[in-house]
Amino acid sequence: MKPVKLFDLNMGQMPSDLPLLPLSEMVLMPEGKFSIRLTDYRQIAMIFWALAHGRMLAVVQQKSNNQIYLKGCAARISGFTENEDDSLMLYLTGVCRFNVIEETNIEGFPVLKVDYKPFSFDMTPAPECDKQNLLYALDIYLKTKHVDIDIILLKDLPIRRLIATITSILPFEAREKQALLECGDVHSCIKTLQTILKMDTAIHLDDDKRGRKC
């Protein structure tokens, strides 16, 4: 019998209770990947608890007042490295977004009860999308703001990976990143991302003109 893997989970098998990993000015999108170095003993203990209970976390962006947003993304712990300084390098992969229902406590660390239903499409194959307009807006943004990223390395990414990568590597404001995370389906994410890229490009050009006048 083939062993059940986390990759094989369907929506009905997703855990409804997830240990909380709050992040400042950062979001994780479905199919996105990132690494984070943890030094807090309580967080490291939580990670080892999560490894023994499904290998999943609730990644949620933290507000400036230390409260969390009420939408986040379930993340699979795809790897970790123990360091000699007692820190932990954690590698995460986004799985599915969720709404926060309530916050509880297990083993001394925060746990979120979550609802995946509004974002159930995150776990279905992405629809066919025309990426050309998005890549064009991205190219203009990178050139205008002098961001040293080779767009050729991004253009062949699957659409969800492309959205997740752009969201994580570009210097968007926290509210812009949260707006992207709270979008609906892939088409909605593309539209919002293009809007943010165009607005940020226009603001930069306007500021540049004002600077030259001064």
Image (tube, rainbow, N blue to C red):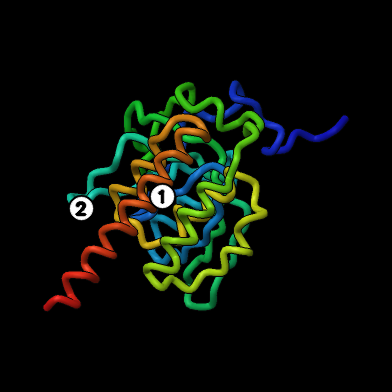
Do residues under tags 1 and 2 come within 8 Å of each other at their CB atoms?
no
Q: Nearer the viewer, residue 207 or 176?
A: 207
* Mark 1 lies on residue: 27
Query: Taking 11 as reference, is 192 left or right?
Result: left
Residue found at x 54% / y 45%: 94
Query: Taking 121 as reference, is 71 left or right?
Result: left
Q: Nearer the viewer, residue 111 or 6?
A: 6
Residue found at x 54% / y 42%: 30
Q: Which mark is residue 53?
A: none
Picture quarter with the N terminus = top right
* Mark 2 lies on residue: 64
Alpha carbons under labels 1 and 2: distance apart:
14 Å
> Helix, strand or loop at disc 2?
loop
Q: How many marks?
A: 2
Residue found at x 36% / y 53%: 23
Picture quarter with the C terminus = bottom left
